Amino acid sequence: MTDKQAAPTLTDAKGMGGIIAQDGFEYQIWDGLARLPAWLGNPAFEGMIFEGLEDLEARFFAPLAPHGSVIDRHQAKSGVLKPADIKEIVEGFSRYNDSYPGTARTHILVTPVVPATLAYMAKDRDRVRKARPFYDPFTEIKAQFDAKFRADVVDQYPDPLGGFVVDFVDFDERNIPDEKIARSLFDSAFHEAFPALDLKASQLRKVFDDLLAMAKANHNIGSFLTRSALIQCIETAMGGDLPLPPIALHILSDRRESNPSMLELDASAFSAGAASTADWQQGLLTPLQRTATWLKQQGAARLIVQGSYRLSAGFALGWSFRSATGFDIDIVTRDGVWATDDRPQADATYAQWDVSDPQLAAGDVLTVSIGILRDPFGDLVASGIPAEKIQRFHLSVPVTSAKEMQAIVGQLKRHVSDLAAKLQIKKLRLYYAGPAQFAVALGHRWNAMPETALHEFNAETRDYVATLTLK
């Protein structure tokens, strides 16, 4: 590797540039503080650094990323840039990406104005991004938007640089000529991020003052400003608590758009027919367990789960955040939010399972068939599994509340657990048909159970296929 191609480091000319020459330093701090309120509203935000490998970098937890986190890298240029300057900057972004693949989510050039000949890179992308939600149902229209923008950029910067710019680079025009404008941008961002707060002007001014002092302090230049330290600084300045949103985990399927205000897990590979060939362990279960560990490190014991997911994914969700490890889950359903700690009432009557116990010898593999409304038992028998080897649970009525869901989860869990203990069962094969929220709730309580192999119905082949095994 030549000097020109050398991987960026903290002590090379680029890494030392912001410390040696402070030109534009206030601009990048003002820009960073203006972004901070929105970042704090995102539970994945872990912290920020000024003058690290870039002018400003923000780190976010990302369960699917190779390192468990990703970086948004901001290069802030307060002066007038020429097209040649822009090209040099994006080439620097590209060198970083080649040197440290998988670490950066995006590279952002922040400047008061992009040169006129390149202005479309900022304005066209922003216009397309704003319009995308309206055109979500029309994939061919969105694809045409993307293709046109890619063609324009590649015409400017032939591949591979052009393709890199399209996929990883943003251009953000932000005119912040002085501290007065910076304060105004921060105030607007703060009110937008925390609309329920009614701070006095003096309180908001002190919040900005203290954050500015924190960012400018010599010992903080090039240091990790953690989420907790930033929140503490703000709360001390305002004299109260920030109304931070509860932690929500948004499961992305093949038909759901991203929600940047939540933790996200892309489970599109496990949607519809694609799930039959996906690696459930590495692609879904490992990231879920990584998320559970990260949440524990943050001191979080409750999360909201929403999105679109298959039944095996729902069971894996509940199992990864199960009650025995200290979690409670608010499951977003079409009928509202169903909480896993919404306990059944002692004097209430709830639906009862229709149960058929199997005839097994000690140490056999136990096949469990669970159906709410639709009963998979007949399909399993037709597939060759003897009826007398199946423990069948069927509920012929819908589940209507969180309390009822917890009641029937408890019934089922106790019955399977008792039988498994009696027969010294070491392995279970589980087949389920019913609402996704029940799969989450059952997985949430599936603690101290034998190794369980989940199966799911494949509409294309009209049979059940193994998905993942929980140990």
Image: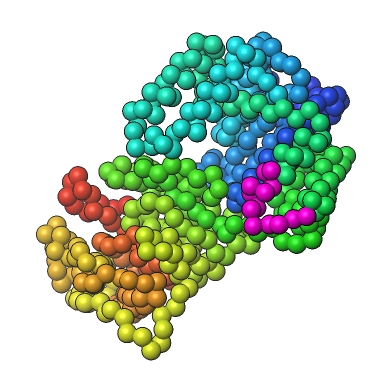
| Viewer can see residue 138 | yes
Number of numbered labels in the structure image? 0
Q: Would you identify the image quadrant in which residue 295 lies?
A: bottom right
Point 54% across, 69% down: residue: 326
Answer with left or right where residue 419 lies relative to residue 459.
right
Point 47% across, 47% down: residue: 265
Q: In the figure, 116 relative to 219: above or below?
A: above
Quarter of the C terminus within the rendering: bottom left
Q: Would you identify the image quadrant in which residue 126 lies?
A: top right
Answer with left or right where residue 290 lies relative to residue 176.
left
Q: Nearer the viewer, residue 395 or 337?
A: 337
Q: Decide whether residue 196 is among the magenta residues.
A: yes
Q: Residue furthest left?
A: 382
Q: In the figure, 106 relative to 242: above or below?
A: above
What span is colored magenta in the figure?
A: 188-200
Instruction: Tell me residue 369's x, y (percent).
Output: 24, 66
Instruction: Tell me residue 177's x, y (percent).
Output: 78, 28
Point 78% across, 30% down: residue: 27
Answer with left or right where residue 427 lies relative to residue 236.
left
Name the image colouring.
rainbow
Q: Decide whether residue 354 is among the magenta residues.
A: no
| Viewer can see residue 233 | no
Answer with left or right where residue 204 lies relative to residue 317.
right
Instruction: Tell me residue 299's x, y (percent).
Output: 63, 62
Point 40% across, 76% down: residue: 403
Instruction: Tell me residue 407's x, y (percent).
Output: 36, 77
Quarter of the N terminus within the rendering: top right
Q: Nearer the viewer, residue 129 or 408?
A: 129
